[in-house]
Amino acid sequence: MRKPFIAGNWKMNTDSAGAVALAAGLAKELSSVDTVDVAVCPPFVYLQSVAAALSASNVALGSQNVYFEEKGAFTGEISCAMLKDTSCAYAIIGHSERRHVMGETDAMINKKISAAISGGLLPIFCVGELLEDRQGGTTNEVVASQIKNGLEGICAESVQAVTVAYEPVWAIGTGLTATPEQAQEVHAMIRGLLTELYGNEIAQAIRIQYGGSAKPSNTAELMAQPDVDGLLVGGASLKVEDFAAMIKTIA
Ligand code: PGA
C-alpha cells in the first residue's frame, strides 16, 4: 500500500553540464516507470537547469536543504518559496552531513520541517546513529530522540507530508551497508514510534527510506524488508545506469 519512493542525493557533485546530462538520462531511462516515485536532489545552483531537463518526465525534483525563514537577511540561505519557484517538490532535511559537518541541531531541523510543510514542500527527514551509538547499543534511543525532536509540534495532518529516511551514519559513503535485518529493526522501531505519536493509520502510510551505501546489488534485499519503503541514494545516484537499475529492480 505504500508506493516505493527512491530519491537520489547528489550532494556536492556534478557540474552544470553533468547535472543536466544525468537528469536527461534518467528522464529517458525511467519514462515507463510509474510504480515507483522517483526524485533527484541536485545542488541548489543546478535546480533550474535540472528542472528543465526533467520537465516532461516522471522524475521529481528535490533540494538537499532549506532554510526555515521566509526571506530577509540570511546570507547564503534558500527559502521554501525559492525552492517551490524552481519546481522542487521535496526537500531533504537533517541529512547527517548537515547535522555532523554543518552543526545542524534537532531544533533547527524541526523548524525546517515545519517551514517546509507550511511552504508546500515534502520533507525527506533524515535520522541515523553514529558508529559509536551502534557499538554502544544506543541506536534506538538516538534515532527515537531525533524523530521525536524533529517532529515536535508537527500535527497528524502535516506529518503525512513527511518521508523519513533512516541513514546509519557509519554506512553513508563508506561502502558498509546495514544488513537488511539491521535496517528492518530500526525501521520497525520508527514505525512503532510514529504509531505512538500519530496512530496506526498514519504510521502505516508514512514512507521510511533506508540510506547508506544503497546500490544495485543490495536494492532487492533491502526493499524486501516489510518496513523499508524506499531508498535515499548518494553515490549510486550519480550514474544513470546504477540509479535506473535500482529503480527498475523495485518496479
Ligand atoms: P551513500 O549516501 O548512498 O553514498 O552512502 C547516502 C546519503 O547520504 O543519502
Image (spheres, rainbow, N blue to C red):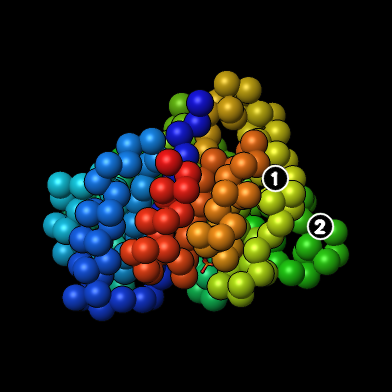
Left or right: residue 87 compared with residue 208: left
Badge 2: residue crowd in 10 Å (few <14, some 14–19, many ≥20): some
- In front here: 75 or 215? 215
Instruction: Report whether residue 248 is seen.
Output: yes
The image position of residue 81, as x and y in percent, is 24, 50
Callout 2–callout 1 Cβ contact below 8 Å: no
Q: Say whether disc 2 or disc 1 marks the residue closer to the N-terminus.
A: 2
Badge 1: residue crowd in 10 Å (few <14, some 14–19, many ≥20): many
Residue at screen point 62% across, 42% down: 224
The image position of residue 22, as x and y in percent, is 27, 66
- Secondary structure of the residue carrying tag 1 is helix
Closer to viewer: mark 2 or mark 1: 1
Q: Which mark is residue 138?
A: 2
The image position of residue 62, as x and y in percent, is 33, 54
Badge 1 amino acid: Gln
Can you tell me whether the CB of the residue at mark 2 lies under 8 Å from the nearest atom of ligand 1? no
Residue at screen point 38% across, 69% down: 238
Locate residue 172: give its quadrant: bottom right
- The image shows residue 80, relative to residue 154, as above or below, that is below
Residue at screen point 28% across, 54% down: 29
- The image shows residue 231, relative to residue 44, as above or below, that is above
Residue that label 1 marks: 184
Instruction: Report whether residue 105 is seen.
Output: no
Locate residue 175: give its quadrant: bottom right
Q: CA distance from mark 2 to mark 1?
A: 16 Å
Quadrant (top left/top right/bottom left/bottom right) for the C terminus:
top left
Can you tell me whether the CB of the residue at mark 1 lies under 8 Å from the nearest atom of ligand 1? no
Left or right: residue 214 compared with residue 161: right
Residue at screen point 38% across, 75% down: 12
Badge 2 amino acid: Thr
